[in-house]
Amino acid sequence: MKKIAFLSLIILIFSCSNETEKKETSKKENQLPLVIANEAKLKSFSHKIKVQGNVSTDKDILLNSEMSGLITQMHVSPGNTVKKGQLILSMDESMINSNIAELESQLEYAEYMFNKQNDLFNKGLGTELETKTAENQVNSLTAKLKTLRVQKSKMSVSAPFDGIVDQTYAKTGQIIAPQMPILRLVNNEEVEVTASVSEKHFKNIKKGTELKLSFPNYDMPSIDAEVESVGNFIEPTNRTFNIRTKIKNNSSLMPNMLVEVEITDLKIDSGLVIPSKSILKNQENRDYIWVLSEKEDNIYSVSQVFIEVITSYNGEALINKSDSLKEGMLIIESGARGITKKDVVRIK
């Protein structure tokens, strides 16, 4: 009995010792830095920039008359759809018609006199000077009559292209002059979106670069497009260049709309990508990360790996591949501040 009691006492002491050791070990583990880790991934990567753009169209004009005159009739009103060549406005032609009639009469007489003088010259009864004078009179009146008929054709105004009358400025009975606008004519079936981009992005933006057009002030879906032309001039005041794209068969965009242009200036099918917030800088301003190596269950040693960042976007960084960092390696995403090479950490 004494022997059994002695063995029981030894077992109890040993169990208590193990329990105490486990608690101390657990306590030490709980004191280790707790970090969030993520893997370095080989994946597609896109970098985008956002700039403000503007909608415009070359078929947005203030229509003017080439001649001064009294408006006898406005043939359109705001909201009307017009076709190219359709009559927009008519002006009083009475004075110019009177001048044309007078010149036609003078020309008829001048032609009669020229024919008579030419007959006399052919018969040797008239001089060359008299014949040339009569001929010059005919040519002069013909040119004046042609000018008046051109002016008459400009006493009416027609639509230069298909479009919609947005606003009229002239009224029937009003006298207009060439510098006075008659109406605004707009055709939005094909519009152009332009944007100014910082010159530092010039080498990465070319014809065909992907665009996404958004309209923050309007309840409209975004539009996928691509760059159709890149400017060949750097604006010296703000160091920007222009890009353009066209939207065809448009039914919703209007000139001067505000556009948010998202430009995909870098797109890689496969690259080494890590979280941006895992990147730290040393005193020499070099970029580095902490790579984890598992020692035992959820206990990791750390090693410092210097990296070359190509670019960052949307919380991710594209880096150059190296032997020190490969796909699948665990890196500290957050909680790395204050960690040294000698530390061991736990993963949250």
Image (spheres, grey):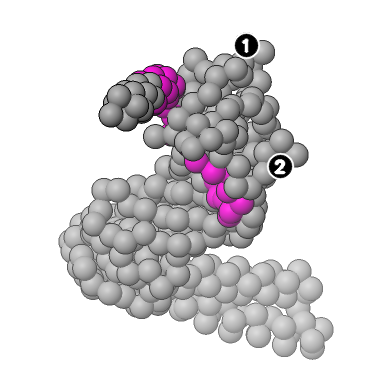
Which amino acid type is marked by label 1?
Answer: Gln
In this rendering, position of residue 167 left or right of residue 3: left
Residue 184 locus on image (x, y percent): 31, 58
In this rendering, position of residue 194 left or right of residue 15: right
Query: Looking at the image, is mark 1 or mark 2 earlier in the sequence?
Result: 1
Residue 282 locus on image (x, y percent): 61, 16
Q: Residues within 10 Å of mark 1 (few under 14, many from 20)?
A: few
- Judge whether residue 96 can be spotted in this image: no
Pick the residue in front: 63 or 57. 57
Residue that numbered label 2 is attached to: 321
Whether label 1 touches label 2, CB < 8 Å: no
Residue 28 locus on image (x, y percent): 42, 19
Residue that numbered label 1 is attached to: 283
In this rendering, position of residue 323 left or right of residue 254: right
Pick the residue in front: 8 or 247. 8
Quarter occupied by residue 136:
bottom right
Q: State which region is magenta.
A: 18-47
Pick the residue in front: 218 or 17. 17
The total number of labels drawn is: 2
